[in-house]
Image: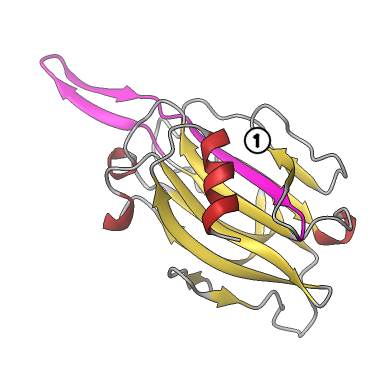
Amino acid sequence: MAINLEKGQRINLEKSNGTKLQNICVGVNWGAIEKKGFFGTKKEAVDLDASCAVYDDKKNHIDSVNFRKLISNDRAIKHSGDDLTGDLNGDDGLDNEVITLDFSQLSPAANHVAFFINSFRGQDFKDIPFASIRIYEGTPTKVSQEFARFDVANDVTFAGNVSMVLGVFYKRNEEWKFSAVGVPTNDKKLEQTIVTIQQNHL
């Protein structure tokens, strides 16, 4: 049963059988904006960008994965690739961009792994159909078990914004845990969001 995440919530990375989760997917799903005009309705493509930033125990930014860099230096984090349009014909049930994370392959220097999304063209979250971001076990094309999600499109918290921070995986006593952040930011670019996370959410 997936948890609808709330700001500040912490979730245990433990499966129903008691074993620790070693591989996770963070998926972002969204649709195209419908605009009505004199000649009927037309679709406006939406480009959301899922990104991940890695920091050490002193909060130094040491690596990133995003649409410009699809694989982390340690190869533990991989991005499915840049989706420039969203679902043009309604929700197909699949995430448009997925980042996979293998905790067992992460560099020993990694202490925080933060996930966030940016609206590349500056399109307001409130206008983007069924925009959501979720954490699950599986692959980019198959969900085995969904653990948690933020419903971005239907949460007034995100209205008027073009960037948001999902949350941060952090290492404590050699175990990985997750803290939900779930807040919008004023950032227009992903580089700015990396700094915002570094200053406010680690």
The quadrant the N terminus occupies is bottom right
Tell me if residue 12 comes above or below residue 194 in the rendering.
Answer: below
Residue 76 percent coordinates (x, y): 83, 49
Horizontal side, residue 71 vs residue 149: left or right: right
Corner quadrant of residue 146: bottom right
Residue, x 85% and y 39% (percent of image)?
Answer: 73
Horizontal side, residue 164 vs residue 80: left or right: left
User: Which secondary structure lies at badge 1?
Assistant: loop
Which residue occupies the extreme bottom position in the image?
Answer: 18
Tell me if residue 164 comes above or below residue 32 in the rendering.
Answer: below
Residue 125 percent coordinates (x, y): 34, 42
- Residue 54 in the magenta stretch? The answer is yes
- Residue 89 in the magenta stretch? The answer is no
Corner quadrant of residue 62: top right
Whether residue 94 can be seen here: no
Of the pair 104 and 96, the residue shown nearer to us: 104
Residue, x 53% and y 66% (percent of image)?
Answer: 180
Span colored in magenta: 31-57
Circle 1: residue type: Asn
Residue tagged by mark 1?
66
The quadrant the C terminus occupies is bottom right
Residue 93 percent coordinates (x, y): 50, 48
Residue 137 percent coordinates (x, y): 69, 62
Horizontal side, residue 21 vs residue 7: left or right: right
